[in-house]
Image (spheres, rainbow, N blue to C red):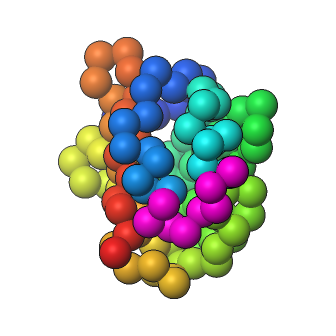
């Protein structure tokens, strides 16, 4: 089984976050506020089942899924879109592909040392 991502992780930086939000069509005011907050991720992993909470002073978000099973995701509180999401392992990286209004959307989580990384796939 790949790496265990369970834990509480604090954001250190968010490179090109504004560009990502702009590509998603997120309004100006929300983008300005969102890029200033430093969210915390709480990941609970139980075998192939995951709960990921993103917590901040601005908004909170919760997603639950099982590896390899497509699910309906409502990104209410983030960019307020509905999509079909599928999360899989790519070696030791947790990768999500989202199908919906925007193509090539998703994210990848991985650990290096004692830091959790998140790379978002920028929609076209």
Determine which quarter of the picture holds residue 14.
top left
Q: Residue at x 46, y 21 (%)?
A: 12
Q: Residue at x 35, y 59 (%)?
A: 121
Relative image position of residue 72 (x, y in whole percent): 63, 77
Relative image position of residue 39 (x, y in whole percent): 62, 31
**How many numbered circles does the render carry?**
0
Q: Is residue 2 left or right of residue 81?
A: left
Relative image position of residue 112 (x, y in whole percent): 28, 24
Near-viewer residue (36 or 113) = 36
Identify the image quadrant of the N terminus.
top left
Above or below, 102 against 4 in this view is below
Residues in magenta, as a range: 22-29
Q: Residue furthest front?
A: 28
Relative image position of residue 64 (x, y in whole percent): 65, 56
Q: Residue at x 64, y 30 (%)?
A: 37
Determine which quarter of the picture holds residue 66.
bottom right
Identify the image quadrant of the C terminus.
bottom left
Near-viewer residue (30 or 43) = 30
């Amino acid at each position: 089984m790949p790496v265990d991502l369970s834990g509480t992780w604090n954001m250190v930086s968010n490179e090109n976050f504004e560009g990502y939000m702009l590509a998603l069509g997120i309004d100006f005011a929300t983008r300005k506020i969102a890029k200033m907050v430093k969210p915390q991720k709480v990941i609970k992993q139980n075998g192939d089942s995951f709960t990921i909470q993103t917590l901040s002073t601005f908004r909170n978000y919760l997603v639950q899924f099982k590896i390899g099973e497509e699910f309906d995701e409502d990104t209410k509180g983030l960019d307020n879109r509905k999509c079909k999401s599928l999360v899989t392992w790519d070696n030791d990286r947790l990768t999500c592909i989202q199908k919906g209004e925007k193509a090539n959307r998703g994210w990848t989580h991985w650990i290096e040392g004692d830091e959790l990384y998140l790379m978002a796939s920028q929609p076209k």
